[in-house]
Amino acid sequence: MNLMKKIKNAKSIIWFVPILIIILGLVIPLPYYIEAPGSAVRLSELIKVNKRTDDNLGSFMLTTVSIRKATPLIYFTKYLPFREGVTEKEYLGMSKSSEEYANLQQYYMDSSINTAIEVAYKTAKESYKLIYNGIYVMSILPKSNFSEELLVGDTIMALDGKKFKSSTEFIDYVKNKNIGQEIVVTYKRNGKIKTISAPLMEIEENKLPGLGISLVDHTSIETDIPVSIKSDEIGGPSAGFMFSLQIYTQLTEQDLRNGHEIAGTGTISTDGTIGRIGGIDKKVVAASKEGATIFFAPDDGINPVVKKKYPSIQSNYKEALKAAKKIDTDMKIIPVKQFQDAIDYLNQLK
């Protein structure tokens, strides 16, 4: 009887161990991330211009890359087609935490939305006004006296109670102070305004006083014709170009798509330049799965210095062509350098 009980217990253990291994393999987090094809989102669901949605046939779609925290089992999915693994350090970059990374991605998204609106309104010859909000904190040196107080994503609104009209004025004000001199910083975080003070440090590169942060102008935009964009679950700057297309189409009340499902990606600059993004091969896969028939890809020039360091690097357009061929899709890959390139292509679309 004892022998039968032992055999039964042994069988239970034999079944339990592999199940436990599978469970642990699925839930134990690793300092690693897996990038994969994400989604293609129809912009008519996200954007309203003059409180109206776009109900014309066809769609403009932004495309995304899915980023998932790896576990021991998920780790091996990096060997599947159009998957890529990155270390936590590579993923976070200069950010000290996932919170800082999220804040940085939110800044990039907000900035790309503002620029997209500016480009669309400028091209449509509609009025807009840029509003200066202060200095956006992009990174903080570990030796900065503000490193325990400020976070990436904070907006510095004033120094010593003084407001500025540009980051140049901000930097000039700090340069005229002394190393070790106390300075009062007023900043906004999550809608709340706070004030802190600490001594200025010596910046190693130029031996001048500074807060020990990298910064950019934090601006917003106001328009006579209202525009709203829902981007809550999307981060980064790569949707800027497609945002511009959707907004421009609704502003001008033109049916530029002619019923086509059109996806794409790329950053947008105030002069209309469409910039390079990462993971375009995965975005091509996402667009094709969603039924896109046309895909706009940045035809970015590769800097000779970058080309020398990375001889195999290609433009986004060539990367997109390669991915489209690999999945054998009929989706057309269209190269674009400037916003006007896309408008010109759509005007001759049938």
Image: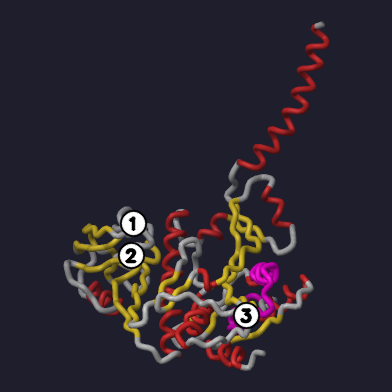
State the CA–CA distance, disc 3 to disc 1: 39 Å
- x 72%, y 28%: residue: 16
Q: Look at the numbered discs 2 and 1 and tell me whether their residues touch, using CB distance below 8 Å.
A: yes
- Judge whether 320 appears above or below 139 on screen: below
Question: Was residue 248 drawn as part of the magenta stretch in this picture?
Answer: no
Amino acid of disc 2? Gly
Q: Mark 3 packing: few (<14 Cα in 10 Å), some, or many (20+)? A: many
Check residue 223 in the rendering and tell me which mark sits there, or answer none. none
Disc 3 marks a residue whose amino acid type is Ala
Q: Is residue 236 above or below residue 101?
A: below
Is 171 on the left or on the right of 161, as rendered? right
Question: Residue 342: x percent and y percent?
Answer: 58, 87
Q: Amino acid at mark 1?
A: Ser
Spatial CA span between label 2 and label 1: 8 Å
Say left or right for 188 vs 310: left
> Tag 3, which secondary structure?
strand
Q: Nearer the viewer, residue 348 or 1?
A: 348
Which circle, 3 or 2, is nearer the viewer? Answer: 3
In the rendered image, residue 330, in percent from the top left (x then y), is placed at 76, 78
Q: Nearer the viewer, residue 227 or 12?
A: 227
Residue 304 visible here: no
Q: Which residue is mark 3?
A: 297
Q: Earlier in the sequence, mark 3 or mark 2?
A: 2
Magenta-colored span: 281-310
Q: Earlier in the sequence, mark 2 or mark 1?
A: 1
Compute the Cα span from label 3 to label 2.
37 Å
Label 1 environment density (alpha carbons within 10 Å; few <14, some 14–19, many ≥20): some
